[in-house]
Image (cartoon, coloured by chain):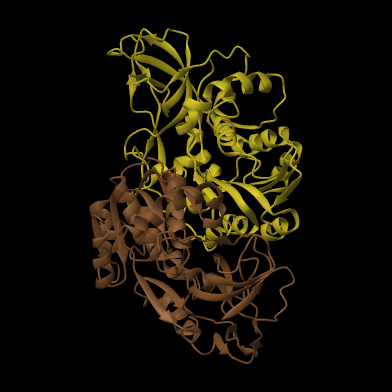
Chain colours: A yellow, B brown
């Protein structure tokens, strides 16, 4: 078979503020791949089906970064994805297997290091993209963090970006345990979804003061942060003694200078515990119970979730921006190819 | 016996910055007490022997405070102290007993609520003031926090105010376990004492850059903070992944606007755990083992500690200021009367 084009999304330029479509990343079609003869050297050849566009990717675009493996100029960007194996020299993986893990943002790839990839059976017959959302990393983030940290500190939890992939699932986990849930988002439409997820108090932080809401409905015993900045300062003010804060994201500071935290002192005065949380650290501990619990319930329609599916690698640039500004409506996923 | 003067230190004025001797608190000698006939109503009459002047007292002087029981204008200030019972109507306490707990800054007091006071045997024959320092609340703070939080995160600990009552004891606890200890203070003389306590790296933060020291001797796995501000930001930069931060004090912000925390993001990026720590919360758990371990070792000279003993209630105003500016040399104690 003749070589075919293998489109790739290349990291083109360090953004100074928000990522810019057409500049920060570019679509490159200069490479071709011979699917039958591309050497595997013990690896597997995969066809990428779906890719996840997550807020944390902005951190990979910084020249001064906090990650061990930031994006490199001129190279493909990468992130969570689902692919299907079309050739294999790795005895653990067979042609036709679907795998989840970090993938380059390309159409076809040879993967060699598969230590952290896992096969997905999908016996529930869910769309593959769902394994990038509520059944994937964001779902695991909410689930693992909730299991690990949500000890019985009290009954009121405040969640920012409550309509996001992590937040909306977390609301539902907390409601299963009967907690009082306060959640915020940045549009009326998102607030509506938060309400559908069962939150007791849902509000648009752009039109309603977080401080006022927490004064009325707090104090809070648990805070799950995706935002930082003023939300975090308000939560520190509204925290009950011995409250627990999970810092899962700080998007307010990703695309510019982060706002310093003014109310750090409450950590001392109220004996708070604060945990910076990255899901991978807890996957060994909670990953198996997640798989037992979550995908079957999702398949039965018992967890609400939303996807914002975009088609083709050409959509990546705009989607990277939309996820930073909150213009996505549900888990942002790029469907690269059909199964 | 005729009534005698009962001098009292009254809270006179809310300070806006540092407490001011002669203004923030004043010595009042207008009250008298009849030691034989003062009604006890089931309580005890005590003679105050020694009072502790601690950094946290500044927080009690704020109009907008974080404590449930701030100082009240025109009333005695209060804090940790040692007294001797001279009359008792409480069957749990006898004349001659020495008790430790919160005392008003006066010469004689009737105490009724003795729930949180404890008798001190002092079978070691230590000066009573030592029970306000290494054998008292500061010692307990270091000990309880160390026992509770110093799980094996790694081998390097950074301690601010390393020559203080808490810091200097913490250095010695950490060295007993063979940790690498970095500690800072604000004068050469204090740095000398830190070295005597066994720290591996001791420096004067006023003349040496904390950032540079931590770059050379870090990363740090454990940070014990008494300062906040730039020290905290430097520690966040120098933290190893999964490091543990104990926030025990934030004195850089006590006497003015606290400096916002710029590097909060590292809590997320490095999966840090941060605990606001107030010793009382852990006394039930670690108090008994503290008493078994610490006073005998102090009596045998196996823990270094320093006291800055001032005599008489008239010294309180200046001592309150000195403790905020770091001009005390050792645990600041007011000896009010001899035993």
Image quadrant where residue B234 sits: bottom left
Q: Position of residue A188 (x, y in %)?
A: 73, 48
Q: Residue at x 55, y 85 (%)?
A: B25
Q: Residue at x 71, y 74 (%)?
A: B40
Q: Position of residue B266 (x, y in %)?
A: 42, 50
Compared with A216, B65 (above or below) is below
Image quadrant where residue A40 sits: top left
Q: Is residue B265 visible?
A: no
- Would residue A117 be found to the left or right of residue B217 on screen? right
In the rendered image, the residue lying farthest to the front is B1
Q: Position of residue B157 (x, y in %)?
A: 33, 51
Return the residue nearer the eye: A314 or A123. Answer: A123
Compared with B34, A271 (above or below) is above
- Would residue A115 be found to the left or right of residue A270 on screen? left
Q: Is residue A150 visible?
A: yes
- Would residue B336 be found to the left or right of residue B192 on screen? right
Compared with B2, A177 (above or below) is above
Return the residue nearer the eye: A262 or B274. Answer: B274
């Amino acid at each position: 078979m003749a070589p075919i084009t293998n489109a790739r999304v290349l990291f083109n330029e360090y953004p100074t503020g928000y990522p810019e479509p057409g500049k920060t990343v570019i679509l490159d079609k200069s490479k071709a791949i011979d699917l039958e003869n591309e050497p595997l050297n013990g690896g597997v050849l995969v066809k990428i089906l779906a890719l996840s566009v997550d807020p944390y990717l902005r951190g990979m675009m910084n020249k001064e970064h906090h990650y061990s493996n930031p994006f490199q100029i001129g190279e493909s960007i990468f992130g969570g994805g689902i692919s299907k194996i079309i050739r294999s020299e790795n005895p653990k993986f067979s042609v036709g297997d679907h795998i989840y893990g970090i993938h380059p943002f390309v159409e076809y790839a040879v993967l060699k290091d598969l230590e952290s990839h896992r096969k997905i059976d999908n016996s529930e017959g869910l769309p593959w993209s769902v394994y990038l959302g509520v059944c994937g990393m964001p779902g695991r983030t909410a689930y693992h963090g909730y299991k690990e940290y949500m000890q019985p500190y009290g009954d009121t939890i405040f969640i920012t970006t409550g309509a996001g992939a992590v937040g909306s699932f977390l609301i539902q986990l907390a409601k299963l345990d009967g907690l009082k849930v306060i959640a915020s988002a940045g549009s009326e439409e998102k607030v509506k979804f938060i309400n559908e997820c069962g939150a007791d108090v849902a509000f648009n932080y752009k039109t309603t003061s977080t401080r006022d809401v927490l004064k009325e409905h707090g104090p809070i015993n648990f805070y799950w942060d995706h935002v930082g900045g003023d939300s975090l300062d308000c939560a520190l003010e509204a925290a009950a003694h011995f409250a627990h804060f999970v810092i899962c994201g700080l998007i307010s500071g990703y695309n510019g200078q982060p706002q310093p935290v003014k109310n750090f002192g409450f950590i001392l005065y109220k004996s708070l515990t604060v945990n910076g949380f990255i899901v991978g650290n807890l996957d060994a501990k909670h990953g198996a119970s997640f798989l037992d619990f979550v995908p079957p319930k999702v398949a039965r329609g018992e967890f609400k979730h939303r996807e914002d599916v975009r088609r083709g690698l050409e959509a990546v640039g705009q989607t990277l921006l939309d996820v930073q500004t909150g213009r996505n409506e549900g888990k942002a996923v790029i469907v690269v190819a059909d199964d």
